[in-house]
Amino acid sequence: MKVLVVGGGGREHALAWKLAQSPKVTELLAAPGNAGIAHLARCAPISAEDIVALADFAEREKVDLTVVGPEAPLCAGIVDEFERRGLRIFGPNKAAAEIEGSKVFCRHLLAKRNIPSPQFSAFDNPNEAKAYIRQKGAPIVVKADGLAAGKGSIVCATLDEALQAVDRIMVEREFGAAGDRVVVEEFLEGREASIMVFTDGRTVKPMLPSKDHKRLLDGDRGPNTGGMGVYCPVPYIDAALFDQIVETIMKPTIAALAEEGRPYKGVLYGGLMLTREGPKVLEFNCRFGDPETQAVLPLLDGDLAEICEAVIDERLHEVKVQWNQGACICVVMASAGYPGAYEKGKPITGIEEAEREESVIVFHAGTAVKDGQLVTAGGRVLGVTAVGKDFNEAAERVYRAIRRIHFDGAQYRSDIRPTL
Ligand code: AMP
């Protein structure tokens, strides 16, 4: 089977790595891929957002299965376009992907079905949003409705910040058209966790929960980033809480989408706050998380290609989705300056030595090859990942591996592991 992975970050490297292990997969392609993915797949220089060019490529190459990493092509309808041409593709169609594409749609859907969520109100007028904020007080959260590369949610400690957030989103248009509408919602307190599930629209098979670390610096300090590291599973989610999340949040959301005439197929990612009143939804994503996928897939004891096919054919109930014991940690190595402006083209050394450490995989995010030398090509450069029998072993392995890798200005967190 010939498989195409769409995207070119750490998540897509992890997808390609797992798909390459499937006995069903005879050839792997990626668009656009990156320098790490190029070891596993033939990379084509097509943007992940150029849906027509991707479909042309899949037709020309007679691709049997396409797996999509990022949200932008899913929300723009890549699945609809591939299906229209009779091409097999894993992911939700445009209507179902709106669960991530519009926070207003998502919040209304959850409220209608009483799926545990923060209180909220949605606005297309900044003055009305501000009046609501004045009435509610701070802390409060202001979110741009549309896709904003993970930056559209502004957690506001003070009233002033919240009023400014409305201006930033709706008046200054910091996130462009994503800011036509805002959601203003209750600030929730608790610990965060993510759960991804495979679903064919009816059957739901959960993955292990994971915990991302959004802040740049140790101790959850510094600016927000795309994610600086993940551990999997999550020790503070026991079997009962896990069941509660799947039964009261993930399954009802998938059922609600089906009842709304938007049957959901693919991976549904729930970003959750574990509050004193129980788990509540912070957001849904319509795809694998990044970097979460880099710490979750190494523990998957199953054939990802087979799972994707079963989802497409709506027979997920026939497939086993099992998990290995143990723990996995992924630590992101980022360029100096990230998440602000950063330089590219810094030579990277030591990856082979790092991968000689037991159970270590180095996923590439922003890398490229220039004049035969591996160099940095993005803000998040590598996802150094290790599996161990427990978190102590995984942490020892991952940080030993990291110390072998060098590039000018590399920054990473040294505390990616569960705290008590
Ligand atoms: P989102 O993009 O909606 O997942 O939000 C990004 C981050 O903002 C989350 O990971 C949380 O840390 C924080 N956040 C979002 N919504 C809320 C909320 N209602 N209460 C508290 N924190 C939130």
Image: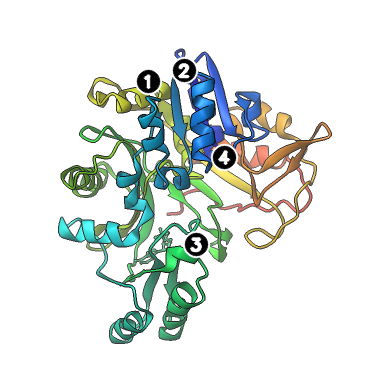
- Taking the image as drawn, is residue 274 in sight? yes
For badge 4, the amino acid type reads: Gly
Marker disc for residue 22: 2
Circle 4 residue: 10
Marker disc for residue 131: none
Label 4–label 3 contact, CB within 8 A? no
For badge 2, the amino acid type reads: Ser
Secondary structure state at the residue bearing disc 1 = helix
In the rendered image of this protein, does residue 32 appear above or below residue 147?
A: above
Of the image marks 1 and 3, the number of the one nearer the N terminus:
3
Other-residue count near label 4 (Cα within 10 Å), few / some / many at <14 / 14–19 / ≥20: many
Q: Residue at x 36, y 31 (%)?
A: 84
Circle 1 residue: 306
For badge 1, the amino acid type reads: Glu
Residue 124 in the image, given as x and y percentages of width and height: 34, 73
Other-residue count near label 3 (Cα within 10 Å), few / some / many at <14 / 14–19 / ≥20: some
What separation in Å lies between label 1 and label 3 (alpha carbons)? 34 Å
